[in-house]
Amino acid sequence: MPNDTSLIPHDPVTTIPAAARARAGLNSAFAGPAPILIAAVLWGTTGTTSSLAPSAAPPAAIGCAGLVLGGLLLFLTSPGARPLPAACTRAERGLLAMGAIAVAGYPVSFYPAVHRIGVAVATVIALGSAPVFTGLLAWIIDKSRPNGRWAAATTAAAVGCVLLALGPGHGHGHGHGHGTSVDAAGIAMAACAGLSYAAYSFIGARLVGRSHASASVFGVMFGAAALLVAPLVLGSDPRWLATVRGSLVTLHLAVFTVYVAYRLFGHGLRHTTAATATTLTLAEPAVAAVLGVTVLSERLPAVSWVGLAILGAGLAILTVRSAEKTRKR
């Protein structure tokens, strides 16, 4: 990934004022994995939030409604989004189109998966498979073989996710009493969500790596995706959106899990590879599980707490290493 600016001068540390060193350290940390981890925390609220939507709301329509509003917000508040397609090469415009399709594919597959197999299992499968898909995409397209640290961190995080999902009683589907039962269609939908997420993360990282502004890239992809899924929302009896619960759920998904989260995620991709970024976002299942315990009064057994610890260790491997690399630039 390109290094846009040098955050710390090359002069000896003793010549840099303490306040400047503190600011540089803060900026360095925020330029590394921190924005992606914050985005993952916000994404971890999607399952709990969607479970509070009116029971009449179709699963896919819930996520798509958040994408329509959040995607349009991203597009309209990104000054460089409108002229970006014209500034891109033909191949890059093709990447933007594929990215938009991938973005649209995520809520269409993820929220029905949540409805069928529960939040915990769907999140684990989607987010646990995403780093694998991203690593494979980088390997196949860029001939970039994942390094040992990425493999170790991803393996630890994936094991943690599996243990997290083994704990009974913390799958909380869309208000229909789903536990952690698993069916083939639900697993396939969750895996498709993981592939969708990996695809648009990979495409976004590639376009940002070509010196396109991250806000513009994600603004275009999400704005186009919003138009793609709008018919699904409007064609599925959208009266639930007029209720207080429906509007609050949609606003939360749009503002926090789409607009704010992807602003942070796009910024983080300027300083973090797509493979590392998707592994860092495995923090999302942990957040989802903790919210289930604290907000929905669900019980988390010992095996799941062990999974949380292993997941945290895997994320720490990448986070510390990414911060070290950023400080050395």
Image (tube, grey):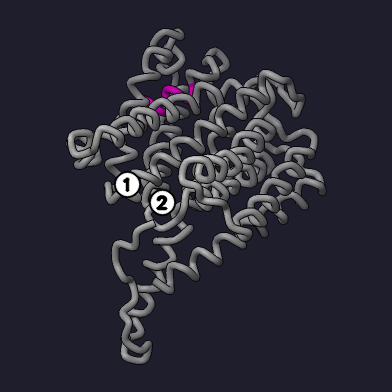
Residue 123 place in picture, x, y as percent: 62, 35
Which quarter of the rendering shows the C terminus? bottom left
Q: Which mark is residue 54?
A: none
Question: Which residue is at the front of the view, 108 or 73?
Answer: 108
Local crowd size for mark 2, using a 10 Å CA cut-off: few (<14), some (14–19), many (≥20): many
Local crowd size for mark 1, using a 10 Å CA cut-off: few (<14), some (14–19), many (≥20): many
**Above/below status of 297 relative to 226:** below
**Above/below status of 143 relative to 108:** below
Q: Secondary structure at mark 2?
A: helix
Find the magenta span and give its range. Answer: 62-68
- Residue positioned 69% across, 33% down in the render: 121
Residue 154 place in picture, x, y as percent: 64, 51
- Quarter holding residue 259: top left
Question: Which residue is at the front of the view, 92 or 35?
Answer: 92
Tag 2: amino acid: Leu
Q: Are marks 1 and 2 in contact (CB under 8 Å)?
A: yes
Which residue in the protein does label 2 denote? 269
Which quarter of the rendering shows the N terminus? bottom left
Q: CA distance from mark 1 to mark 2?
A: 8 Å
Residue 97 visible in the shown view: yes
Q: Main secondary structure of the magenta part?
A: helix
Residue 300 place in picture, x, y as percent: 76, 43
